[in-house]
């Protein structure tokens, strides 16, 4: 029978190593690739703090020959597509290790657990600094945006869309308990990270922060853009729904990173809200100074009309979430765009 205390020590030891290794990989790029002394020093200080918790007691519990997970690998670990992929993978590695440390340290040393929680948020900030600019670039070049709705095989549908080429996913589930929202948002964040896509949360800034989403999307009656920016920081994406020129101009002046333009057609997603038609799409084409996505009842049957009115980016819900083949539907939408 495995000794419980020994197992906990081994978990802490392994994840301290994992977090330090991931930080070192990020630190080397900050030092030699970016020549950024501030961020490199920050990484080094976090590594040193982790080392201060890595006691002899934890080290001697190590039992590599009997570690059943030492030779378990995943195909995604075998190669990295680009530098951002490498940095993202190692930042996620650090965050996951810190979460494990935070939880298991509660059984070992509560001060240790608190320190790991604080460091996890430091790493979130580090991630925003390193990858935030890349996220804004991905937003600018993305033409198709998926807004989720509750359907059967929810995660499978979203992953199918990601396989089809969607690069922005917004989690929207108005009528669900917060605990389930947190679990679903966390799983979606992991999926989007795996497919190098942006992940945003509708309305709920707290959930976005909890799962380290890439940003939030706000409605007209949600938190003001300026306050959301104050809470989330400059590295996160903030979108805003608009349905007329006044709302558009205000969203832009308030500092939104992109806007939704719609609903173009009537949709049950916005029950009771009148469609604004294609005139506002044309207005957005002529006047919007930030990325914008036409939204509301758009699918492969009417997307050409929306494009003719001036849209180069669209957001969809049912067209993908309720499709028989979400991957094929996604590819068709992208082909039209």
Image (spheres, rainbow, N blue to C red):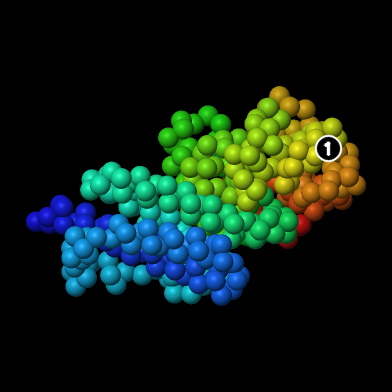
Which residue bears the numbered disc 1? 249
> In the drawing, does residue 37 fall left or right of residue 304?
left
Q: Nearer the viewer, residue 188 or 52?
A: 52
- The residue at 44%/51% (across/down) is 120
Give the total number of marks visible in the rendering. Answer: 1
- The residue at 62%/48% (across/down) is 236
> In the drawing, does residue 122 fall left or right of residue 200?
left
Q: Nearer the viewer, residue 327 or 149?
A: 149
Question: In the rendering, at what x and y percent does residue 286 appear?
Answer: 90, 47
* Residue at the top extreme of this rendering: 272
Question: In the rendering, at what x and y percent does residue 17 appear?
Answer: 33, 65
Report whether residue 189 is seen: no
> In the drawing, does residue 148 fall left or right of residue 181?
right
Q: Nearer the viewer, residue 195 or 213?
A: 213
> In the drawing, does residue 79 fall left or right of residue 65?
right
Residue 103 to residue 166: above or below: above
- The residue at 48%/54% (across/down) is 123
Dot 1 falls on a residue whose secondary structure is helix
Question: In the rendering, at what x and y percent does residue 109 appear?
Answer: 25, 47
Q: Nearer the viewer, residue 185 or 48?
A: 48
- The residue at 48%/37% (across/down) is 181
Crowding at dot 1, Cα within 10 Å, few <14 / some 14-19 / many 20+, comes out as: some
Residue 75's quadrant in the figure? bottom left
Report whether residue 35 is seen: yes
Residue 8 to residue 154: above or below: below
Question: In the rendering, at what x and y percent does residue 8 appear?
Answer: 21, 54
Residue 183's quadrant in the figure? top left
Picture quarter with the N terminus: bottom left
Picture quarter with the C terminus: bottom right
């Amino acid at each position: 029978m495995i000794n419980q205390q020994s197992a906990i020590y081994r978990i802490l030891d392994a994840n301290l190593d994992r977090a330090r290794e991931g930080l070192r990989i990020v630190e080397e790029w900050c030092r030699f690739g970016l020549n950024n002394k501030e961020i490199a020093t920050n990484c080094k200080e976090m590594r040193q703090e982790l080392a201060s918790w890595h006691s002899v007691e934890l080290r001697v519990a190590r039992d590599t020959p009997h570690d059943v997970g030492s030779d378990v690998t995943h195909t995604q670990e075998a190669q990295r597509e680009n530098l951002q992929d490498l940095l993202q993978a190692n930042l996620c590695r650090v965050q996951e290790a810190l979460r494990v440390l935070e939880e298991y340290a509660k059984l070992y040393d509560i001060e240790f657990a608190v320190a790991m929680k604080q460091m996890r948020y430091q790493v979130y900030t580090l991630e925003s600094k390193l990858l935030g600019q890349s996220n804004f670039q991905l937003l600018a070049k993305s033409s198709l945006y998926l807004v989720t709705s509750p359907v059967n095989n929810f995660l499978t549908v979203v992953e199918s869309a990601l396989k089809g080429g969607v690069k922005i996913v917004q989690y929207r589930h108005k009528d669900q308990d917060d605990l389930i929202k947190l679990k679903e948002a966390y799983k979606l964040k992991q999926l989007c990270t795996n497919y190098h896509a942006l992940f945003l949360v509708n309305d709920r800034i707290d959930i976005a922060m909890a799962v380290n989403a890439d940003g939030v999307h706000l409605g007209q009656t949600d938190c003001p853009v300026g306050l959301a920016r104050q809470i989330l920081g400059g590295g996160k994406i903030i979108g805003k729904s608009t349905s007329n020129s006044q709302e558009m101009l205000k969203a832009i002046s308030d500092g939104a990173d992109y806007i939704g333009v719609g609903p173009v057609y009537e949709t049950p997603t916005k029950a009771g809200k009148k469609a604004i038609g294609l005139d506002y799409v044309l207005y957005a084409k002529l006047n919007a100074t930030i990325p914008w996505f036409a939204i509301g009842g758009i699918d492969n049957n009417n997307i050409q009309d929306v494009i003719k009115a001036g849209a180069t980016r669209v957001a969809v819900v049912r067209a993908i979430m309720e499709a028989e083949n979400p991957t094929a539907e996604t590819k068709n939408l992208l082909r039209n765009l």
